[in-house]
């Protein structure tokens, strides 16, 4: 297979303002390239520009580029063959925070991990597992395949929607192995290869990857500093006619924004006019932290054209790997057909566990929200004290803070922070189209004392990175 050629102009844009006064220019260039490769913004197997092409594009000496490439080869991030150019690669052992498939808390033991916006399990899961084991024998006499999910779990999920004012039957629920699986199934059911799928920017990167791997083209609409830009969304819907839209309107990841009811209604009308199927991810719906009244479910504004995704991964525990789709009755068979080529159902035992957890969700979630509110406020206080130049708005729910830095140094900060024991993900990872180098997502899922120490280390990392002359801010950054 021929390696994908990365044009010099494209690579120069990805590099941004890479030069600093902390050491030789070639080392700064090599470190910036290493971060781009390790963070997945330059995929392994891509052919980088020749030394001459990159020299001309960056306006630096040939020695600087040649030395940077040599250092990357020595560290395992480039492989070169005479006559074939240099190909990006990953070394056998990549730093934990930059490997996109590490297990937080295990692979990152001894490090402060801000790469994963998820909490440990809520109390009571062990008891729920014990109760579920007592009920398991009656299922052992069956094949164990439930493409739509266990009836008792589907009824519990449907009842929760009815309590929110959205009429729902158990037959409208399809249980999946988490929200990401639900996203993949819904996109596969409602689109064909080459179709456009609209989403926000910034947004959850794994879901964007799932959309693209379904063969769809992502149409990303930038969010404004105050949330969703409804006129821009409406104009984009009219101009691009997306077949589907995947959005997070409840404490949007990573910005923490909550879409008001009036905006939901206005956007649902725009989707209906364009015959765009809205796929609404409610992963963070349960995590309102200020006691605010939540807007109605998005699906209430268009019951026939909205698919809703839910999960217990953020509210109870990610290790359960149980999510679901709530679909209009007319789409259920179509979604099940699409699901059949991906898997044949979620694990029975985990479904039994989640059924029991949902029956006692009130006190369990209240305790979860109280703990998260304390951690959110602790993080906000620590950031204001240690990093007063960073800007953020206190989110009313969710699991993370979206911080704007004075300079576009997000990707560079990743490597520096790692050396100080803190793992972070650059804001660029949350952009479907690149950019957002002036942003950083900081979850508040660690213990309060740990959060304070981690922020102090993050502040030291940032100060060491920006001690030199200020980096010129680009005009393309958005909030």
Image (spheres, grey):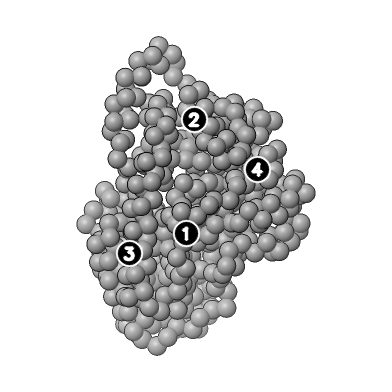
The residue closer to the viewer here, 9 or 281, is: 281
Measure the alpha-carbon separation of dots 3 and 1: 14 Å
Q: Earlier in the sequence, mark 2 or mark 3?
A: 2
Mark on residue 396?
A: 1
Q: Earlier in the sequence, mark 2 or mark 4?
A: 2
Position of 249 relative to 15 (above/below): above
Residue 433 is situated, as x and y percent measured from the top left of the image, at 57, 62
Residue 375 is situated, as x and y percent measured from the top left of the image, at 33, 59
- Left or right: 353 in relation to 231: left
Mark 3: few, some, or many residues within 10 Å (few <14, many ≥20)? some
The residue closer to the viewer here, 21 or 25, is: 21
Mark 1: few, some, or many residues within 10 Å (few <14, many ≥20)? some
- Left or right: 401 in relation to 119: right
Residue at the disc numbered 3: 378
Mark 4: few, some, or many residues within 10 Å (few <14, many ≥20)? some
In percent of the image, x 76 and y 58: which residue is there? Answer: 239
Residue 56 is situated, as x and y percent measured from the top left of the image, at 53, 80
């Amino acid at each position: 297979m021929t390696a994908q050629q990365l044009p010099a102009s494209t690579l120069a844009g990805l590099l941004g303002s890479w030069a600093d006064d902390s050491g030789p220019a070639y080392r700064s260039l090599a470190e910036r390239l290493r971060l781009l490769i390790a963070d997945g913004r330059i995929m392994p197997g891509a052919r980088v520009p020749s030394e001459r092409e990159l020299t001309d594009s960056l306006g630096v000496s040939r020695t600087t580029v040649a030395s940077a490439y040599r250092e990357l080869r020595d560290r395992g991030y480039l492989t070169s063959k005479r006559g074939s150019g240099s190909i990006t690669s990953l070394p056998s052992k990549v730093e934990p925070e930059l490997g996109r498939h590490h297990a937080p808390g295990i692979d990152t033991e001894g490090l402060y991990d801000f790469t994963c916006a998820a909490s440990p399990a809520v109390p009571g899961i062990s008891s729920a597992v014990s109760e579920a084991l007592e009920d398991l024998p009656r299922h052992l006499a069956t094949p164990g395949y439930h493409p739509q999910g266990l009836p008792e779990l589907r009824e519990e999920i449907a009842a929760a929607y009815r309590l929110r004012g959205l009429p729902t039957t158990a037959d409208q629920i399809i249980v999946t192995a988490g929200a990401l699986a639900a996203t993949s199934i819904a996109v596969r059911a409602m689109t064909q290869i080459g179709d456009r799928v609209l989403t926000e920017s910034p947004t959850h990167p794994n879901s964007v990857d799932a959309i693209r791997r379904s063969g769809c083209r992502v149409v990303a609409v930038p969010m404004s500093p105050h949330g969703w830009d409804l006129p821009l969304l409406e104009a984009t819907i009219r101009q691009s006619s997306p077949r589907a839209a995947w959005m997070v309107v409840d404490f949007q990841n990573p910005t923490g924004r909550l879409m008001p009811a009036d905006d939901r209604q206005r956007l649902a009308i725009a989707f209906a006019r364009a015959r765009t199927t809205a796929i609404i991810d409610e992963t963070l719906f349960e995590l309102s932290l200020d006691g605010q009244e939540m807007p109605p479910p998005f699906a209430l504004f268009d019951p026939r054209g909205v698919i809703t995704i839910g999960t217990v991964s953020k509210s109870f525990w990610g290790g359960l790997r149980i999510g679901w789709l709530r679909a209009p009755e007319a789409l259920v068979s179509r979604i099940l057909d699409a699901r059949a080529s991906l898997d044949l159902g979620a694990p029975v035992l985990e479904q039994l566990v989640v059924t029991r957890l949902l029956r006692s969700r009130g006190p369990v979630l209240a305790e979860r929200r109280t703990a998260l509110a304390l951690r959110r406020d602790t993080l906000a206080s620590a950031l204001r004290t240690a990093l007063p130049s960073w800007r953020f708005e206190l989110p009313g729910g969710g699991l993370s803070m979206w911080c704007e830095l004075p300079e576009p140094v997000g990707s560079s900060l990743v490597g520096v922070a790692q050396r100080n024991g803190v793992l972070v993900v650059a804001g660029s990872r949350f952009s479907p189209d690149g950019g957002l180098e002036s942003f950083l997502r900081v979850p508040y899922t660690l213990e309060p004392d740990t959060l304070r120490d981690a922020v102090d280390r993050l502040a030291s990392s940032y100060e060491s990175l920006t001690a030199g002359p200020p980096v010129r801010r680009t005009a393309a950054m958005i909030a």
